[in-house]
Image (cartoon, grey):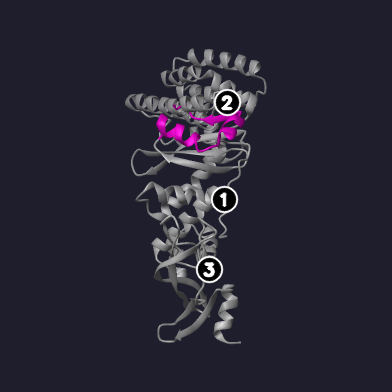
Amino acid sequence: MKDTALYEQLLGLSAPWSVKAVDLSLTEQRVVVEVVLKKSQVWTDPIDATKRAHINGWSERQWRHLDTCQFETVIKARVPQLKHSDGTVEELAVPWAERYSRVSKMMAGFVIKLLEACPSTQAVCDLTRLSWSTVNAIMVSAVERGMLRRTEEKITHLGIDEKSSERGHTYASIMTDIDRSRVLDLVPERKLEATVGLLETLTPAQRESVEAVAMDMWPAYMSAVKQCMPQADVVHDKFHISKYLGEAVDTVRKQEHRRLSQAGASPLAGSKWAWLKNYPDGRSAEAVSFRTLNQLNLKTSRAWRIKENFSQFWSYSYKGAAKRFFKAWSDNAMRSRLEPIKKVVKMLRRHEQGLLSFSQHKISNACAEGFNSAIQLIKANARGFRNFTNYRARILFHCGKLNLAVA
């Protein structure tokens, strides 16, 4: 079989395209495949089927293809620019590559599989000998293609959370499909306008199908949901509630440690993480040591018990029972005379309806919290992001569960 016929089969070419020549350079370790069009080829005008499109010019193009026996392989062709009856000029789409792409479809598919297996873009660049901009363009194109392929599925439970996108206090708002554990989309900032724009990426039918949205107590998120999905219940996320209570316990510990240190020795020295850990077995050396510390007559111990007692709230399945428990717990916490605990209790009372909705829907941002490690790894491998577009593309690529295949 001739080289030209072999590459015609490998590239899946058919009339009017054919391989004219295959040039192998041992010194450059490169194979150049020259593809040509059949002479006198005529194209129908897409605007008016009774007319034909005229050739307005030619573009010398080349595409990187999969290596041939470890030799870098390049496809080269002259591509006509077609002028339609309405005056528009458009470059002809070639069958082996997407329009205006620098790589063939086969190469793009290979790069996508490498990116799925390896979160480091630079490692994929080194393996394929492609530039960073080319690999990044393949990823962005794959995400755009995957987003267009998403079907209008019914979404029952949403999650909205914030993620740090750059150094400092720069945040992005991320929206997740809780039931399917996937990222739906994300936008820069966490303001009301940004959150409304994020929710409006869903179709009207999808927004109407949402029954509940899990979120933190950020006012912009609650206002956006009320504006875009008035029928949906707001459910305050249990992980953030636990975080607030844990921070209150730590504040009590720091205040008490400072007071005891001034009076003499403090048993709370170096115990910060001991109050934040869980001890499920109760028999480990750490659990025994913590139990001894917890049995001391300390304000921190009282704060810790108040925090631990609240965990029972999440087990209720009826709103009335949950409401009674919350009232009894919050009344007891307010009598504790521990100002950091009382501050959190007052905040929870202001958002009581969002807390009680958990008993009905039993949802949380657990999947969004689970994405944190993946997002942190993406940020670490990228050494940060210069723009939000690349940050969004990588999160959707790895966490969006999109159909990324090249057509």
Position in image of residue 175 (x %, y %): 51, 38
For residue 86, which numbered disc appears in the image? Answer: none
Task: Name the kind of residue labelled 1 in the image.
Answer: Leu
Q: Is residue 296 visible?
A: no
In front: 364, or 284? 364
Q: Is residue 283 visible?
A: yes
Task: Name the kind of residue labelled 3 in the image.
Answer: Trp
Q: Which residue is mark 1?
A: 402
Q: Which residue is mark 2?
A: 232
Residues packed near mark 2 inside 10 Å, few (<14), some (14 to 19) or many (20 plus): some
Residues packed near mark 1 inside 10 Å, few (<14), some (14 to 19) or many (20 plus): many
Task: Name the kind of residue labelled 2 in the image.
Answer: Ala
Please state which of the two labelled residues, at mark 3 or mark 1, is closer to the viewer: 3
Q: Residue at x 54, y 48 (%)?
A: 148
**What residue span does the magenta drawing correspond to?**
190-218
Q: Quadrant of the N terminus?
A: bottom right
In front: 389, or 162? 389
Position in image of residue 17 (x %, y %): 54, 74
In front: 298, or 382? 382
Position in image of residue 13 (x %, y %): 57, 73
Would you say 89 lies left or right of 279 here?
left
Q: Is residue 91 magenta?
A: no
- Per the model, the C-alpha gap separating discs 3 and 2 is 47 Å
- The residue furthest right is 317
Location of residue 219 by image quarter = top left
Q: Which residue is mark 3?
A: 96
- Mark 3 or mark 2: whose residue is earlier in sequence: 3
Would you say 206 lies left or right of 102 here?
right
- Mark 2 or mark 1: whose residue is earlier in sequence: 2
